[in-house]
Amino acid sequence: MIKVLLAEDQGMVREALAALLGLEGDIDVAVQLARGDEVVAAAKAHDVDVALLDIEMPGLTGIEAAAQLRRACPGVKIVVLTTFGRPGYLRRAMESGADAFLVKDAPAAQLAEAVRRVLRGERVIDPTLAAAALAEGANPLTSRERDVLAAAADGSANAEISRHLHLSEGTVRNYLSAAIQKTGARNRTEAVRIALEKGWL
């Protein structure tokens, strides 16, 4: 049996995925979670073979959880699931150590087959997203520019961002200016929107 960890914060979606995977004769959903920061401990406790991680979860995102899991349990295969097919998410998921990246509206049989394929050492990527990611190119934002832009997403003033990230206000202004220029936006609000839409944040 393939032991699977399923981390998805929406209860109905999590239970539906678990039920569908449970119909497969060779897959056992050993543990279900609603938070990204519980993934590593649960993977160790249940000795799972594959972790299915939703991107948007409380505690840690699926991408952050994937990176921690890759370091803590290198033998566990990682499948990242998303509702939103954003090319930037795909690139970041692969960089974090994911073995597969699928959109949730794919057929259930495709998910089960992806679980089997990653265990055989294959990479599984939604083909439409792969093409979009290649067309989109790399994320132009540096990690610090992403931090500052993410901190600005709720409308925080430069002074608040500088306190939160322990940077000077001038440095915050410089990072925001660079992020606005790189996203081709007119202002910080538009830069945040564009970066979110592309999966860069």
Image (cartoon, rainbow, N blue to C red):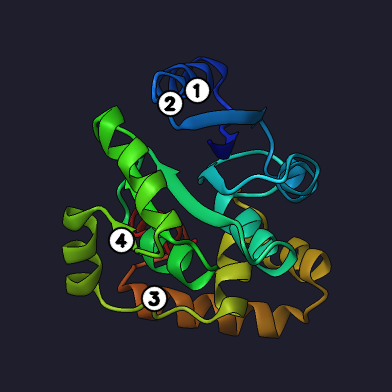
Q: Where does residue 64 sit, x and y in percent of width and height?
A: 63, 58
Q: Nearer the viewer's eye, disc 4 or disc 3?
A: 4
Q: Secondary structure at mark 4?
A: helix
The amino acid marked with disc number 2 is Leu
Disc 4 + disc 3, Cβ < 8 Å: no
Q: Residue at x 39, y 75 (%)?
A: 139
Tell which circle, 1 or 4, labels the residue nearer the N-terminal end: 1
Mark 4 neighbour density, 10 Å: few (under 14) some (14–19) many (20 or more) = many
- Answer with the quarter of the image where residue 167 lies: bottom right
- Seen from the viewer's position, the closer of residues 101 and 111 is 111
Query: Which residue, given by chain and number where applicable, does mark 2 sit on?
Result: 21
Q: Where does residue 58 sit, x and y in percent of width and height?
A: 67, 39
Q: Nearer the viewer's eye, disc 3 or disc 2?
A: 2
Query: Which residue, given by chain and number where applicable, does mark 1 sit on?
Result: 18
Q: CA distance from mark 1 to mark 3?
A: 33 Å
The amino acid marked with disc number 3 is Asn
Query: Which residue, given by chain and number where applicable, does mark 3 sit on?
Result: 139
Residue 13, relative to residue 53: is it above or below?
above
Residue 46, relative to residue 178: is it above or below?
above
Q: Nearer the viewer's eye, disc 1 or disc 3?
A: 1
Q: Nearer the viewer's eye, disc 1 or disc 4?
A: 1
Q: Secondary structure at mark 2?
A: helix
Query: Which residue, given by chain and number where applicable, does mark 4 sit on?
Result: 87
Q: CA distance from mark 4 to mark 3?
A: 9 Å
